Image (cartoon, rainbow, N blue to C red):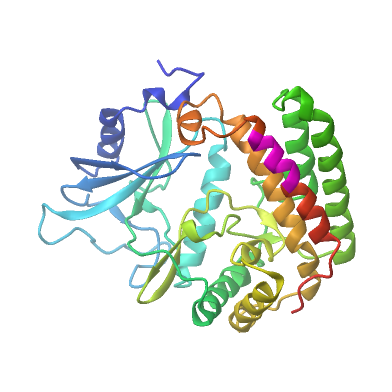
Amino acid sequence: MMDVSHPYSALTPDCALDALDSTGLKADGRLLALNRYENRVYQMGVEDAAPGAHPAVGPGVAPAGGTPPDTRPAGGLGAAPVVVKFYRPERWSDAAILEEHAYTIELAAREIPVVAPLVLNGTTLHAHAGFRFAVYPKQGGRMPEFDRADTLQWMGRFLGRIHAVGAQAEFAQRPALTLETFGTASRDFLRDGNWLPADLVAAWDSVVEHALSSVAICYARAGAVQAIRLHGDCHAGNVLWTESGPHFVDFDDSRMGPAVQDLWMLLSGERDEQQMQINDILKGYEDFMDFDPRELHLVEALRTLRLIHYAAWLARRWDDPAFPAAFPWFNTQLYWQARILELREQIALMDEPPLVA
């Protein structure tokens, strides 16, 4: 029986390999845990491709309703490894996971370089021993070099293509990125859970209230911007770079929100550096998707929401043994002192004029 206090304690290597076997793919015993914490993700070797396995969509793949090509490797043994993602129990409903899969499949159908789940036995979502999981083709690549203008323009082009598709429909099952979902709810979770040292509670309460008020002002300045389907967590770790350009992975945090959410995480450095970076990104982006310059009022507001949400995320996951081991500095006196200082800096940044499109 699964230990409900630590959901992943029952996900042993044998269990993970048996899960892949249950799809019709035959694991060859090779298993490598990848550096993910919200879900558990493994690279697994495969002896051969199953007759019913094919990429969801993509170049050279039959359209929906057609007959998928046989993608079994010619050599039998030595088939390409796959990546298997075991979803954190009780985080998403089946419908929300399938909605994410459908979005990536929709993008891949337009030959946008996203890594979509494999269709195995007619579905992308599987279950074994109490765990839900999906199987992905392994995608190689390196970290992108965001200090290069041509890289940023390339990223902008593909994000523009992703957003052009994302704007065509809405998510029905996945939450939106808002002041309430990322800011207020995170503040309340931290406050109600007594996560802060007693001597820092007053300072934290004061600075987080000020920060959320400043976020609200930034949203008011931006006005009624369009919410679209996003990648949602478009940082360097979720982009793999190859000679053919970027490949976007891990749409697990995909949700409705302003387009700039997928752009601001590509920015770094001082204001003048960020201004040049956003210019480069938008040069590529606007080849495929119009950008509302009012959304630049939200750059520091969204950064502030992410900082608050990240602290609450660590707190929410603290009963998972992997988190204290990976983030030993969380919930220390120095950690909260740094967060208070960070939010004060964000308040000052939100008072400054926005970047210019």
Which residue is rendered at x = 71% and y = 38% of the image? 337
**In the rendered view, would you say 260 is above or below 174?**
below
The residues colored magenta run 334-341
- Which of the 4 image quarters holds residue 269? bottom right
Q: Is residue 227 left or right of residue 263?
A: right
Magenta stretch: includes residue 337: yes
Percent position (x, y) of residue 245? 42, 75
Asked whether 215 or 287 is in front, the reply is 215
Q: How far across and how far down the image is residue 71, in percent?
A: 24, 61
Residue drawn 34% across the image and 68% down it: 61
Left or right, 21 with reference to 228: left
Q: Give the x, y percent position of residue 14.
A: 25, 29
> In which quadrant will I find the N terminus?
top left
For residue 149, above or below residue 181: below
Name the side, left or right, on which 282 lies relative to 85: right
Residue 15 appears anywhere in the view: yes
Please say if 150 is above or below 43.
below
- Rendered-image quadrant of the C terminus: bottom right
Q: Residue at x 62, y 60 (%)?
A: 230
Asked whether residue 176 appears in the rendered view, the answer is no
Residue depicted at x 66% and y 80%? 279
Instruction: Decide which of 137, 119 is in the foreground and name it.
Output: 137
Q: In this orientation, which residue lies closer to the viewer: 257 or 110?
A: 257
- Report x, y in % for residue 107: 50, 66
**Outermost residue, top direction?**
1
**For the image shown, how many numbered marks are present on the structure?**
0
Magenta stretch contains residue 194: no
Q: Would you say the magenta stretch is mainly helix, strand or loop?
A: helix
Answer with the quarter of the image where residue 219 lies: bottom right
